[in-house]
Each structure stands twice: as structure tokens, then as C-alpha cells.
Image (cartoon, grey):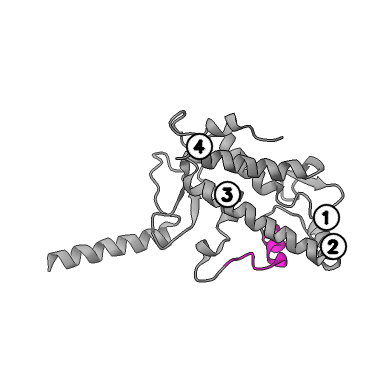
Amino acid sequence: MPVSLSDARRADSRDRPPGPVPPRTRLWLDFVNTDAAAQTPGGDLLRDFEALLSWFQEAGAVDDERAAGIRRRALLQPAAAAATLVDARRVRAALRVLAEKGHLTERVRDDAVLEINRVLGRSAGTRRLEARAEGGYVRTFVPTGDAFAGLMIPIVESAADTLVNAELARVRRCADPRCHRVFLDGTKNGLRRWCDMGTCGNRAKAARHRARTVTRR
């Protein structure tokens, strides 16, 4: 179901202060972090259609049976597969702007809603609730017709959930200026600054220590 602009506006932190949320990731943020900015110097993780499909499999957004069918179709329709990759990168770029600036700017949220609804509106299929083999349940989308249809549905639905659940104020970019990764702050006080304390956080601590050492000299 399309997301309304009023739903997105309710995500504004001025209207509703964020409360504590569980410290778990969001699929759309993981997807944003595949871009070249976040992966420097490794480069874009979605270098081709196969890399895109493999990422979806590893993220649990596409099961192995459906992925095999999409791979077969990609061999028969390489132009359609290439167009799907281009569209995935377009969605990713829009969601990066949402992650970095959406909590501050209503226009950014409105633009993201338009992009989310563009993807939701063009994909025909059936949404299902299925049991996981390892236990628990998962929502799935089974496209009808085009094998590539609906591939981006899990990503945009994840972003839509963040807007509807007013979590956007807790989405931010890592405070390390050299890092472009975005994350969901699940801490109680909402003051997390680093994507990962073991890398960016420790690097910042080391930099502060070096600065104090130089000051003492």
C-alpha cells in the first residue's frame, strides 16, 4: 500500500521525539551502504546484476528458488537485467539522501515517499506470510509476470516502515568524516555517533589521544 505524505511528515522529530528502539539494523540502510561512498576504497558492491541479486540473497530478501529463476531470466533478457540494476541504483541514491537528510528536511522526505510509491505502484504480485525453515515468519512478495518485478519491494517497504514508525530521527551517517555508512541508532539516549565502535569509534578515540599528547608537549 502506498505511503502517504502525511505519514512521512509524522516522522519529523519536531512533531514526535524519538523513543528507544531495539538496536537492530534496517534492510534499506544495509542497501544504502552498498554504494561506492560507503565502500571506499572497495567500490560499489552492486557492480553488476549478479552482484545485486547475490546481495539480495545474502540479505534474505530473495530466496534461492526465486533467485535461480531470476538468473535464468537475466541470461535470456540481459537488457532487462541491466535496466533493473540501473533502477536499483536510482532507488539507493534516493534512500541515501533520505538517510542523511530526511530527519531535517520535509522536502527530502516527500521526494523519498514519491520514489517509494513509484516502486510500490509498478509491481504487481502477491504478498504472503511464510514460515522460515529455521523458525519464525517472514513477509514475502511473489511477483506476477516479469521476473524482475518486485525485486526492490523489500527495500522500499523497509524504508516505508522507518517513516511510518517515526524512526527517521534515529537514522544518521557515521560521525567519522571519512566514513559514509549510515545506521540506525538503537541506544536509549539516542547519542550514538559511529557506525561501528570497533573501527570508526576507535579511530576517533585514537585521534583524540594523539591530539592531547601533542598539546601536552
Seen in the picture, residue 36 relative to 149 is either above or below; the reply is: below
3D distance between C-alphas at marks 4 and 1: 35 Å
* Extreme residue toward the left, this view: 217
- Quarter of the image where one finds residue 124: top right
Q: Label 3 vs label 4: CA separation?
A: 14 Å
Residue numbers of the magenta segment = 44-57
Numbered circle sitting on residue 73: 2
Picture quadrant of residue 62: bottom right
Q: Give the spatial CA distance, label 2 vs label 1.
A: 7 Å
Marks 3 and 4 in Cβ contact (< 8 Å): no
Nearer the observer: mark 4 or 1; the answer is 4
Q: Which residue is mark 1?
A: 147
For marks 1 and 3, the one nearer the N-term is 3
Judge whether residue 138 can be spotted in this image.
no
Where is residue 185 drawn, in percent x and y?
A: 46, 45
Q: Which residue position holds label 3?
A: 95
Q: Are marks 1 and 3 in contact (CB under 8 Å)?
A: no
Residue 189 within the segment the image draws in magenta? no
Q: Which residue is mark 4?
A: 106
Amino acid marked by disc 3: Leu
The kind of secondary structure element at disc 3 is: helix
Q: In terms of depth relative to the viewer, which is nearer, 53 or 99? A: 99
Q: Earlier in the sequence, mark 4 or mark 1?
A: 4
Q: Earlier in the sequence, mark 3 or mark 4?
A: 3
